[in-house]
Image (cartoon, coloured by chain):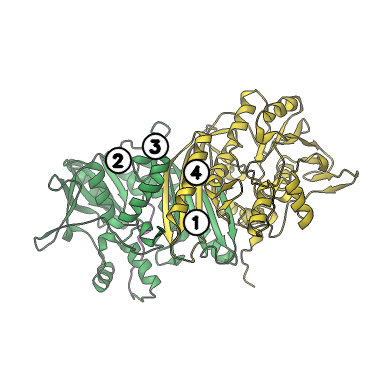
Chain colours: A yellow, B green
Amino acid sequence: MTKTITLAHGNGGAENNELIKEVFYEAFKNEILEKSEDAAIIQNGELAFSTDSFTVSPLFFSGADIGKLAICGTCNDLAMMGAKPKYLTCSVIIEEGFEVEQLQRIVASMKKELEVNDAIVVSGDTKVVPKGAVDKIFINTTGIGEILYKGISSNNISEDDLILVNRDIGAHGATIFAAREGMDMNSNLKSDCNSLYPQVKALIDSGIKITALRDATRGGVSAVLNEWAKQSNICIEVDEEKIPLCDEVRGICEMLGFEATNLANEGTFVLAIPKDDVVKAIEVLHGFPEASNACIIGKVTQQYNKKVILNSSWGTKRFLDTPTGELLPRIC
Amino acid sequence: MTKTITLAHGNGGAENNELIKEVFYEAFKNEILEKSEDAAIIQNGELAFSTDSFTVSPLFFSGADIGKLAICGTCNDLAMMGAKPKYLTCSVIIEEGFEVEQLQRIVASMKKELEVNDAIVVSGDTKVVPKGAVDKIFINTTGIGEILYKGISSNNISEDDLILVNRDIGAHGATIFAAREGMDMNSNLKSDCNSLYPQVKALIDSGIKITALRDATRGGVSAVLNEWAKQSNICIEVDEEKIPLCDEVRGICEMLGFEATNLANEGTFVLAIPKDDVVKAIEVLHGFPEASNACIIGKVTQQYNKKVILNSSWGTKRFLDTPTGELLPRIC
């Protein structure tokens, strides 16, 4: 039987990782790619380089739109490597018949978010394809950042580190799901989509040592923790009750049986930092309104190598696995 | 009436330029972007940075496929700024149900072409979207090149320069057209899709002064010459009979009324070089089998400012304008 690509291959979870390893890493192999970081580190460690294509549906949703998302997504990948976003390219593929006014709204969002990052778009590409060849508009942004803090890596986490998140999780995934299903949440649910460079810069400026940082996009916090456990050859133990969740996301998860840790985020990151720096890091993050829920969620142990354990409030333990299956397509 | 995006907005010609200027340059304005070069020059002139998204249909065609095209397209944009392609990102958007074997063929083509450029893919992104949200597969590549030869610019062409092409023109556009229409050319017609860095490096290594270089992709040679005339504030006079054309492309143009100078190319570039270096440049290019038709096609004058004039073999003259209208969508 002919093997075909499934939606699960784009889930940010297990099948996605498999496809990337078997097809892309296999063909393109090189040391930089194999580090599997959020951004490649090039030019003797001076620059970070990262790409993302955005296919989100709907284009406009509570808290952001594809334009803001396209700038945040790439700038955040750079920030996660301790880099200041500097130069971006912007490549759009537009369906014939798309409204110019909508394009202008999207581009205005991009402009606004570029300013937050103090970054500029220096090169672009515009393709228009016939009706039906693309759903409305897809945007690729690729960015170069200047590394301010060296040595951040998902490969060096140890028992000296604690695991934190900068805010309550799952808001982006829940928002897109609610928008797509036409659910009237009658609530304050909105995407966490946000530029993370200001928070990262504040952490660096306050002298905090950063072992690892990663924004929990497709595949959510579960995917990040599992990749870290594998890459750093450690066990991560997370306390379920410590993971911050807003009421709206909790409600959607309870109603539909989702795991909040599998939901995508676009302004939420997981940090591994040395124990001695944790109090200060939380204090710094609490200086940002969007990070007022920043907290410790877990620790590093040697209990089960390359595994993530979730401790429930009932005292039970279970493995928190890399998400599998279709999850929600076109989340970003 | 609501203004919408049309296929003409992606033609590489007049409407495309208008959209880019009115929507993207307007929002993103900065000095680098406004230079309108093939690639942005960043980091104190040390690096070139360029992006392209590829939506070509069909995916496989005589002489190349979307994979080879995606590497050539971005590496050529870097080479056109005198840069050695170095690091690329690769972002794919795949339609659910796409065959893994086809993906592997595409990726194998990319790998082979990366080797020609001695470049590596250091970061990537893989999205899978539901059936109907994209036609099979779109690929974005974004590249960083190290500038070997500084000062190439479309803004500095003068009467001291002559205008050359490196080979016969229009093969890519004619090939895609023939493939899409199911025309059996019963001929050797194939895309010129090819990496141009080796030819550019040979020109640089032989000490030739290069004023401007540009690969004549969407919009063809007409678009390049018109942009140059505008950007350098000059008149370019081209002799129609000097423009090299292979028999197959000439045949398609005669049969269908196309202008060969409007057809897209993917391994064909236009050069502006000082008169004293022209003989040597042609000698260097003739060292490459694919550039055996390299020749002078025109000169720079002051006759009509910012215009391109085509001198026919009958002694008549006409303006060669920037292409307009729908042209052929999904050529690259």
The image quadrant of residue A255 is: bottom right
Q: Is residue B169 visible?
A: no
Q: Which residue is mark 2?
A: B153
Q: Secondary structure at mark 1?
A: strand
Q: What label does residue A110 carry, if any?
A: 4
Q: Which residue is mark 1?
A: A137
Measure the alpha-carbon separation of dots 3 and 4.
14 Å
The picture places residue B73, in percent across and down from the top left corner, at 41, 53
Measure the alpha-carbon separation of dots 1 and 4.
14 Å
Amino acid identity at mark 3: Asn
Discs 1, 2 touching: Cβ within 8 Å: no
Q: Nearer the viewer, residue A191 or B50?
A: A191
In the rendered structure, the answer to whether residue A275 lies left or right of residue B235 reads right
The residues colored magenta run B186-195
Quadrant of the image containing the N terminus of chain B: bottom left
- Mark 2, residues whose alpha carbon is within 10 Å: few (<14), some, or many (≥20)? many
